Image (spheres, helix red, strand yellow):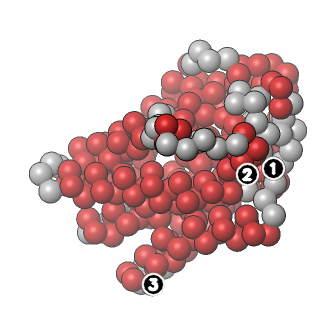
């Protein structure tokens, strides 16, 4: 309900308090978003060139999530690129209009992602599973933002009027299991130990972004969450490719 456009709110009403702990389930949502992308990639690759299939796969994920993460990346690029002070950066990131840095950030991100995925040296079966694995692990890495940094705004000024609670031990282990299992299974099944370095690259990128956010914002925002996920995913594919 939180990370996709599926109309589950028509079937069940979730108390507002539950949304404060939703980030620990982000890797679980990755099984859905990454799984849909992987299925589209596999189906489209049967009849279309691989590059076209990759574009359709991530277009399908875009539709499923309502470009939630991409909106965060665009706002993050605008804020970090155009803001000179903490207050100005936060103001730019909250602005719903997209700027030059945001446009360029999204273009460069998808050019790199589509190129890396379509040229990855692996059969289509492994490629589809890697799409799933990259999504889940990158979401786990990005989810750690709430454990490392405080929220940069107040609950009243947050875009979704929610400040996430830090994970307890159970929440962290839940996120870890759902985040690591696809990559671990793929490593065991294929013997491709390069994926270990891909996972490490995602974690390093997350740590660097957390440092940047602490330095520039003294905390994180919802846009930072989405940007961190996509950039961690890109790092994963840079190593795999």
Q: Quadrant of residue 206?
A: bottom right
**Is residue 106 rendered to the left or right of residue 125?**
right
Q: Residue 184: percent from the left, percent from the top?
A: 51, 77
**Residue bearing the label numbered 3:** 188
Q: Residue 64: percent from the left, percent from the top?
A: 42, 41
Q: Is residue 69 above or below residue 236?
A: above
Of label 2 and label 1, which has the lower sequence position? 2
SS category of the residue bearing label 2: helix
**Residue bearing the label numbered 2:** 21
Contact? badges 3 and 2 (CB < 8 Å): no
The residue lying at 67 percent from left, 17 percent from top is 95
Crowdedness of circle 3 by 10 Å Cα count: few (<14), some, many (20+)? Answer: few
**Residue bearing the label numbered 1:** 165
Confirm whether residue 4 shows in the render: no
How far is disc 3 from disc 1 in space, using C-alphas?
34 Å
Of label 3 and label 1, which has the lower sequence position? 1
Q: Nearer the viewer, residue 241 or 16?
A: 16
Q: Is residue 21 above or below residue 219?
A: below
How far is disc 2 from disc 1 in space, using C-alphas?
6 Å
**Is residue 128 rendered to the left or right of residue 239?**
left
Q: Residue 133: percent from the left, percent from the top?
A: 47, 64
Confirm whether residue 196 shows in the render: yes
The residue lying at 69 percent from left, 37 percent from top is 222
């Amino acid at each position: 309900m939180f990370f996709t456009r599926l109309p589950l709110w028509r079937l069940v009403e979730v108390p507002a308090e539950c949304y404060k702990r939703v980030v620990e389930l982000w890797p679980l949502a990755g099984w859905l978003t990454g799984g849909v992308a992987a299925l589209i990639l596999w189906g489209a690759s049967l009849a279309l060139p691989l590059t076209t299939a990759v574009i359709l796969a991530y277009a399908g994920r875009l539709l499923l999530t309502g470009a939630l993460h991409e909106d965060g990346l665009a706002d993050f690029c605008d804020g970090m690129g155009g803001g000179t002070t903490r207050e100005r950066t936060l103001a730019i990131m909250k602005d719903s209009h997209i700027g030059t840095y945001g446009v360029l950030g999204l273009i460069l991100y998808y050019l790199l992602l589509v190129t890396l995925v379509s040229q990855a040296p692996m059969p289509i079966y492994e490629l589809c599973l890697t799409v799933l694995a990259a999504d889940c692990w990158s979401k786990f890495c990005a989810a750690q933002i709430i454990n490392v940094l405080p929220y940069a705004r107040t609950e009243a000024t947050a875009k979704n009027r929610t400040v996430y609670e830090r994970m307890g031990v159970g929440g962290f282990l839940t996120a870890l299991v759902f985040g690591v299992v696809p990559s671990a299974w793929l490593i065991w099944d294929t013997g491709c130990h390069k994926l270990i370095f891909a996972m490490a690259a995602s974690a390093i990128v997350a740590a660097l972004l957390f440092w940047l956010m602490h330095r520039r914002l003294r905390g994180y925002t919802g846009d930072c969450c989405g940007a961190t996920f996509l950039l961690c995913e890109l790092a994963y594919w840079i190593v795999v490719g």
